[in-house]
Amino acid sequence: MNYLALLVFIFVLPALVGCGPKQDLGQLCTGYDGESSEKPIGINGLSVEADMLSAHINGSLNSKYILPFNEGSSFKVTQENCSSDSHTGKQRYAYDFKMAIGTPVLAIREGVVTSVVENHKDHNGCENGENYIYIEHSDGTIGAYVHLTKDGALVKKSDIISQGQNIGLSGNTGCSTGAHLHLIVWTNKDKNNSVPILFSNIKNTNSSKLKKGTIAEAKKNKPTVIIPPLFP
Ligand SMILES: [Zn+2]
């Protein structure tokens, strides 16, 4: 490969392929800090870091996932990926969104409901269980929506879910220090690792990395139609 071809390969090709906004790789966890010494495997049989890199190269606009709340609304990220608080090890690619109890939770991707728990009361504490909904996606990954409120599931096992469907109501059950949604995508049913994800409908795309403190806003899918007032 001559010098010019090399330049094209390094600079022009990525610009053509990566049509999304410039991505920040800051979210990529460095090293594996889980309990297991085994190297985690991502959904493509590569490391989860390789999956993350691939997600970033594709750009958040091409992500299979959307934010788990209504378009036009925004919520604060109270715990990011790779955080030392509790998003470590297998859970490292989880996000926490601060949400008042009873906030509608939307499916980030289409799939089939594999598990629903909704019997726990809010503020029940760590020693007691948490409410959650699991949705299996077509590639075998599992979207988990955790700490939902009592009787907060709007779906049941085996239901087929479309992306953006209101599946439940957020809460504060189980190991939770305040009302929030813990969102994580597991690589498979065994939950032996989490998948790094981005969201296609983030309004403030500079914040696609969703660091702690970011206010994530879900874009409106359709432009607002302004109806002119009618005069007699
Ligand atoms: Zn969390």
Image: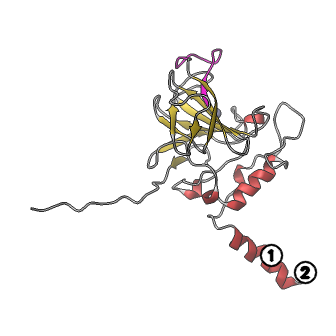
- Find out whether the residues at labels 2 and 1 contact each other: C-beta distance under 8 Å: yes
Residue 77, picture quadrant: top right
Q: Nearer the viewer, residue 210 or 12?
A: 12
Picture residue at 64% right of the left edge, 42% below the top: 80
Left/right of residue 211 with respect to residue 221 in the rendered view: right
Q: Residue 124 in the image: state x and y as whole percent.
A: 56, 16
Image quadrant holding the C terminus, namely: bottom left
Name the amino acid, label 2.
Answer: Met
Q: Residue 2 in the image: state x and y as whole percent.
A: 89, 84
Residue that badge 1 annotates: 9
Picture residue at 55% right of the left edge, 42% below the top: 68
Q: Which of 24 and 94 is in front in this view?
A: 94
Q: Residue 47 in the image: state x and y as whole percent.
A: 84, 48
Q: Give the range drawn in magenta.
A: 120-133
Q: Which mark is residue 230?
A: none
Q: Element at badge 1?
A: helix
Q: How far apart are marks 2 and 1 (CA)?
A: 10 Å
| Residue density around tag 1, few if under 14, some if 14–19, many if 20 or more, within 10 Å | few
Please determine whether, in this image, residue 196 is positioned above or below residue 119. below
Left/right of residue 188 with respect to residue 113 in the rendered view: right
Answer yes or no: is residue 65 visible.
Answer: yes
Q: Is the magenta region chiefly helix, strand or loop? A: loop
Picture residue at 73% right of the left edge, 41% below the top: 140
The answer to whether mark 1 is within 8 Å of ligand 1 is no
Answer yes or no: is residue 88 visible.
Answer: no
Residue that badge 2 annotates: 1
Q: Element at badge 2?
A: loop
The answer to whether mark 2 is within 8 Å of ligand 1 is no
Name the amino acid, label 1.
Answer: Phe
Outermost residue, left side: 232
